[in-house]
Image (tube, grey):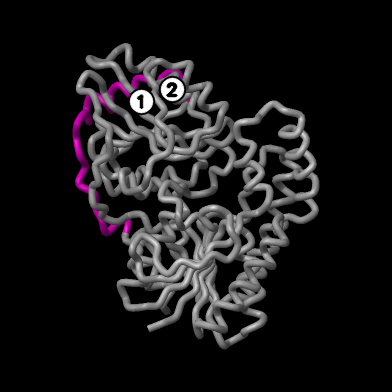
Amino acid sequence: MNNILIICSNLFDDSDANGVCTNNICDEFLSRGNNIFCITDSLNNERYIEKTKIKEKPMTVFGLKQAWYTRWQKNNAKKKGTILTKVVPIMRHFIVLFLYPNVSPIRSLQMLMLAKRIISKNKINKVIVTYRPFESIFTALLLKVIYADKIEVFAYHYDFLTSPNDTNKVIRSYKKLLGNVIVKLEKCVLDRIIVPDLKNEFDTEREVHVGFPLFVERKIVPCDFNFSNNYINISYVGSLDEINRNPKDAFEQLRMASYELEKPIKVHIWGNVSKKVEEIIAEYNFVDYYGRLNNENVSYIYDNSDFLLNISNKVTFDMLPSKIFQMFYSGKPIINYVFTEEDKSLDYFIKYGNSCQFNSCYSSKYKIIEFIKNNYSSRFEVNKSSFELCTPKYIVDKMEV
């Protein structure tokens, strides 16, 4: 039995992908009789709030304030267009370039001090940090330097430091360069770095390649939502924005396809959606947005949809979206919009089998029409062994070695 400290983000947020992944990892560790302690974002941004249980799980959770800019963004989310909301992001952007990737140095130090206190008080022998946020990587590196062989320190990357979400080529290259430096440092200092990359099957003692811990059976918890039989119901659950995951072209293709089907298409959207995308959604009368969805209800939505929709990454196409493995477990037919053939997730959709890949080409509508006609109300028998590396059991096995 180990005393394990897990440092993560959004553990309390059931609609956040990173939070859901970490909860699944915690569940697996707990099922093996380990004692779990967590540092995560506090619910109401209090400092150092301790909770002995979260969602009836026997683990101790410490809440740490989010970085000031994250709090500022939340407080000013509805004040867009004012001078302040325009000037502050620009000023911060230039400051961040000099600090990157440790853009919240004060919070990084707070996290380090809290981690040291928890380690000393609870005889922690293993620390697992997740990225994002970078504060956890900063903490992991210093903890390993401070405690050396007294504790094991692992880093589990949900995102890549080497794939920043920037469209400016100069800034993107600059951040990728610094990201590569940090990753090399991790490989030298930490006991193990775990990355979501199923293509690279070559593991080393310090670097292990796995998926996301989302290919797992979930109890179907109904939510207050019913699909109408008058439509072909297509559901999307996840984040959307105007830069990396812009759904406009996908909506256009689905709109054109809808005219040639026996039933009209209705697209249902849940997730964290930018203001600009909300405006795009309003342009299409066959698309409805319902806000964020708790993870416990995702399986219900998937199970009752005729088709699932995925919008891939345009800028960070070399990153693997975690949500696709939850989609794969459903066995439902997936309509997958891809911006580039270099998209890292494309191979996994092809491996899954029950999916249609399309882009902004006019001919895509015919692929969609054929796919919908051939797969309406169908369910695919998934080869679960193909996605074993995306199960909490497999990933925790790699963390316990």
Nearer to us in this view, 356 or 168: 168
Q: Classify mark 1: helix, strand or loop.
A: strand
Q: Which mark is residue 130?
A: none
Q: Is residue 199 left or right of residue 325?
A: right
Percent position (x, y) of residue 362?
44, 18
- 124 is higher (above) or lower (below) than 326: below
Query: Which residue is at 52% across, 36% downward?
Result: 340
Label 2 CA crowd tier, 10 Å (few <14, some 14–19, many 20+): many
Magenta residue check for 220: no
Query: Which residue is at 32% across, 43% downward?
Result: 298
Percent position (x, y) of residue 75?
62, 40
Magenta residue check for 363: yes
Nearer to us in this view, 123 or 378: 123
Over which residues does the magenta segment extend? 360-387
The residue that mark 2 highlights is 251
Label 1 CA crowd tier, 10 Å (few <14, some 14–19, many 20+): many
- 117 is higher (above) or lower (below) than 377: below
Percent position (x, y) of residue 193?
54, 69
Q: Are marks 1 and 2 in contact (CB under 8 Å)?
A: yes
Nearer to us in this view, 347 or 186: 186
Question: Disc 1 residue type?
Answer: Val
Query: Which residue is at 61% across, 50% downward?
Result: 163
Q: Between disc 1 and disc 2, whose residue precedes?
A: 2
Percent position (x, y) of residue 338?
46, 34
The residue that mark 1 highlights is 267
Which quadrant of the structure image shows residue 206? bottom right
**How far is disc 1 from disc 2 in space, using C-alphas?**
9 Å
* Quadrant of the rendering where the N terminus is positioned: bottom left
Question: Disc 2 residue type?
Answer: Phe
Of circles 1 and 2, which is in front? 1
Q: Classify mark 2: helix, strand or loop.
A: helix
In this view, which residue lies farthest toward the bottom?
Answer: 150
